[in-house]
Amino acid sequence: MSDIKKTGIIGCGTVVQRTYPQVLPKVQGMDVVYVYDIDELNANKAAQIFNASVVSLEELFAGSDLVFIATPPESHFELCNLSIQAGITTICEKPFMPTFKQADEIIRTAEEKDISVYVNHFRRCYPSLSLVRKIIDTQVFGRIRELKIIEGARFNWEAHSEYISNNKYGGVIYDTGSHSIDMALYASGLDIYDCELIIDSVTRDVPEPSHEIQAQFRLSSDGNFIDCQLHLSRYQNLANKITLVMENGIIELPVGLQNKAKLTGPGGSCTVNANREFKKAAHCFAYQCHQIVHNLQTEIYKAKRFLTLTKLLEKISTYV
Amino acid sequence: MLSITIIGAAGYVGIELVKRLYKKKYHCIGVTNSNGFFLLKNYHIQLIKPGEYKKLAKSDIIINLAYPNKVPPLQHKSENENIFQILKHIVSENTKIIQISSQAVFGYQFEHEIVPGPVKNRHDHAYITSKIYLENRITDYFRNNEIHIIRLGNVWGPGAPAWTFGLLNKLVFGDPVGIIAKDGYSNTTDVRNIASYIEFIIENIPKQGSFYHHLSEFSHLRWSFWIDNFCKLLQLDPVYIDALLDQKTSFQKEMLSSIKGTSPVIIARHLMRGQYTGSWMRSLLAKLPYSFLSRLEQKTMSADYFPTIQNFTPRDTFMSIMSCEKQFKNHLIKGWVPEITPEESWEKIKEWMKSVGYSY
């Protein structure tokens, strides 16, 4: 049996045309052979980029060992279902599902069929995240009291459609927010639970899809609620960090690819560095793909780890 | 009504300019990539994508803020040509052209003499080469127009991506922000003052010729002015490193450095580290007299005894700028007064910091 996973990509829009070419061809053990998009132009562009064949969905599922679903979120449920029924390992782009209900259903279906479904949250590879996770696991800092998630930058994505302005999943909460909120959940260890969620307030610049949003909410995995604050923006740089206020101090990590965390206690603060680094975010994506292809330490990317995130995104974006 | 076309209208300086000009007596048009349409949607000015420049009419005033920054360096020249094509299309014989350039045309450490005049095209860092090229392309081609080349200092202000935000991020997370005992001139210019000065030029009496302006109204302030303010506010300690910067490089020096890795000494050191090659090397060297080996080791010992610092090299651009001993002084039209002082700039930055999540 070949060690090379024949890979199909469903959805060949801006993300695939712009980001995937820097990553997928480099991943050992992966070969993109099929592409599909409802827009023939996109499909042909992607086929040219990856030297792949434009095929029908049926042919793609029939011939692939691994499938990327890179369509807009509203089609993730249907396509993931089809992929699971076809028995194919699936990597779904973020945000995983538009609703908690759909996410839960897909996870159950995948478990019943014993098919692996992963979500492309490659920031989980950031060395700073695993560093903070380990620091928290030592319990030196005690329990988490508060979470603050702040990320913003002037929007510079060259979107080829009106997605960010017209699609209800095109707002900053799903785009930037899904990344930074997931970092916070993963760093704090809350991602392994299906947390209880209470939303206290949400303010946004415009109705969804919004481009600046602030929210206050509470999360609990065990009956003790953690106060959370969120601020996301597409207009300007924000402080761009995640702050975990703990019983015995404060842990801060940047949302960007820096391999460090800042620890503050009663006596002062210091910065600790992770002992490895990635040069680019694209390398993190490639590394994640590599781990999935070779079935190495893949638990952290499995779909069930994104239930609380899905719930949060859904509730915040629909809160009025 | 005067028409003003701003190329690069959605950038940090561009947005400040649009905010200022669109309310006034000008017909503003912005040339921007599609992300700019979203960022400028509240300003109700006409927006055109660069690829659609032929829809533009001739403009009374053109302000070009654009430069190649989203393409690899190999594509800078073609990207500059794309910008130039837009200019060619919209410049008439009476158009006033304002080209925004950078102090960097004199080098990141001002290795070249600072003169308020043309700079010859030369080989240098990609950004620098690109900036000089476009300055000269414009002044060479539009000889009969009124041209203002404004070279900016380090762009400062609330949320300025390269400097205010970049420096803050380093301070918060303990990255080095300078070299011990080398507190350089900040050579900063606040974005509001930039927009104010550009407006001043727009309203200035027209005249023919090319004029060079150097704008860095806070150039006299050392970086410690800003760093100390940040640190006092956020209760941080700045990190400085003890390091040597390469003050001057040359084509010859860089060539020699790149083939240094192939010198017999470097190869030998590399072989010594190998599991198998190291063993063979030790077997060979063991046959030589110890006194000879000792002298060889002394001769080939590396002179680099300073500790290596993560993410820092002796040609580090950021550190060069932070430890710059040369001041990029103003060279401006008489009559303009900065709209905000350093203290006012700092107050605005503090407000921004509070609004974006820096706790103090």
Image: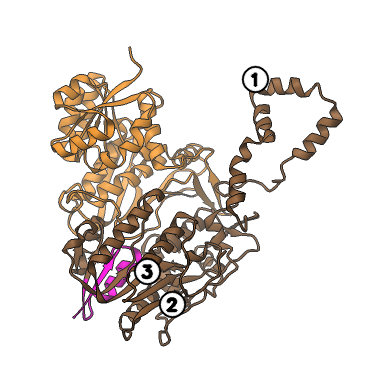
Q: Name the residue under label 1.
A: B276
The shade of chain A is orange
Q: Please state the horizontal and vertical placement of residue A100, each as a whole percent of the image.
A: 21, 38
Q: What element carries label 1?
A: helix
Dot placed on the residue nearer the N-terminal end, 1 or 3: 3
Q: What element carries label 2?
A: helix
Residue B21 is inside the magenta segment: yes
The amino acid sitting under disc 3 is Asp
Q: Calculate the distance from the C-alpha at mark 2 to the C-alpha at mark 1.
A: 65 Å
Q: Can residue A221 be seen in this view?
A: yes
Q: In which quarter of the image is the C terminus of chain A?
A: bottom left
In the image, B252: left or right of A121? Answer: right
In the image, A30: left or right of A46? Answer: right
Range of residues picked out in magenta: B1-28
Number of numbered discs: 3
The shade of chain B is brown
Residue B309 is inside the magenta segment: no
Q: Residues within 10 Å of mark 2 (few under 14, many from 20)?
A: few
Is B45 situated above or below A43?
below
In the image, A172: left or right of A3? Answer: left
Residue A35 lies in what quarter of the image? top left
Q: Mark 2 points at which residue?
A: B344
